[in-house]
Amino acid sequence: MKIQQNISLKNYNTFGIAVNAKRFISINSVYELQQLLKVEKKLFLLSGGSNMLLTRDIDTLVAHIDIKGLSIDTENDKAIYLTVNAGEDWHELVLWCVQNNYGGIENLSLIPGNVGTCPIQNIGAYGVEVKDTITKVEALEIETGKLVSFSNGACNFGYRNSIFKHEVKGKYIITAVSFKLTKNIHQLNTSYGTIETELTSKKIKDPTLKDVSDAVIAIRKSKLPDPKEIGNSGSFFKNPIISKALFLELQKENPSIPNYPISETEIKIPAGWLVEQSGYKGKRFGDAGVHEKQALVLVNYGNATGKEIHALAKKIQASVYSNYQISLEIEVNVML
């Protein structure tokens, strides 16, 4: 465990933003993290770097959480219980589960990032949220260095939300996540988005876990840029939930506005549609831009700074509000 000086974080964030860490340390075990917390409690935590926008150099000690490992806790005829350490790659975990016929997270294929960050914003895609399979989250309390276990209920999961984003933010470091997955009677979710269309195009009538995962991967690749090729952090804005009254007003002037009823009084509107209708899809401002195939994704075409991407996001927010009276909330963590 060695502290390094002046390390570039360009390869540690999926936006590919070139900022420096004044001090940097890689953590490979819970024990190492506990030892570090005895001497340094103020840390800048970095995992897969997939849900953040860095806008400046980091003076605080950057701790790269790279704790690897997976264990099978128990299993029966119907389910298997896994504990996966925080540093494991999320998509690699999904592929491993699909390969072993463990069901529940196949719709979350190709989401960038590591396992340790998946509970923080309750990652979700194509009708599935990670909270549906999480049984508990293990974390170190920064103040005491003690290992604490949060049950699913204690995590206060919501839409792209959890206790780790609000009530206990900055107080704990997630070290592992436990999951309950199905072994044989799988509840496949193919009705959301274009999964069914993708399966039909391949003439698949009785899909397997792999079929669903492959369909999701194909869909995501067709409209989302690979962070290894174009810097991005996936969906930059949350899909806003608005009142039914506002929706009905907007629908008068926008009859084709896509919508997903949440309750009798609330409607979810796709943020990508709002950004596209505001004229930003495919627009580029220097090396900062909006992806040409998916307006929900802001991109770094090479040498954009975090401040330039954040300025573009604020411009988009202002335009959407002016056009639709809807406030877009940034999903990515912006480090100002």
Image (spheres, rainbow, N blue to C red):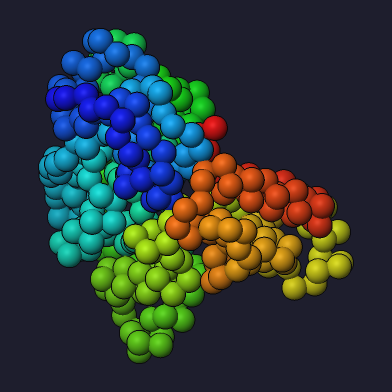
Describe residue 20's horizontal placement relative to residue 208 as left or right.
right
Q: Nearer the viewer, residue 299 or 79?
A: 299
Q: Quadrant of residue 57?
A: top left
**Which image quarter holds the N terminus?**
top left
- Find residue 59 and report its horizontal and vertical position in percent: 40, 23
- Find residue 82 and report its horizontal and vertical position in percent: 19, 44
**Is any atom of residue 273 visible in this view?**
no
**Image point (36%, 54%), residue name:** 112
Note whether 147 is above or below 93 in the view shown.
above
Q: Quadrant of residue 211?
A: bottom left
- Find residue 85 and report its horizontal and vertical position in percent: 21, 38
**Image point (82%, 61%), residue name:** 250
Q: Nearer the viewer, residue 65 or 179?
A: 65
**Image point (26%, 34%), residue name:** 65
Q: Nearer the viewer, residue 206 or 285?
A: 285
- Find residue 127 and report its horizontal and vertical position in percent: 47, 60
**Is any atom of residue 17 visible in this view?**
yes
Describe residue 231's horizontal placement relative to residue 83 as left or right.
right
Note whether 205 is above or below 158 in the view shown.
below
**Which image quarter holds the C terminus?**
top right
Note whether 61 is above or below 326 in the view shown.
above
How many marks can you see? 0
Note whether 272 is above or below 237 in the view shown.
below
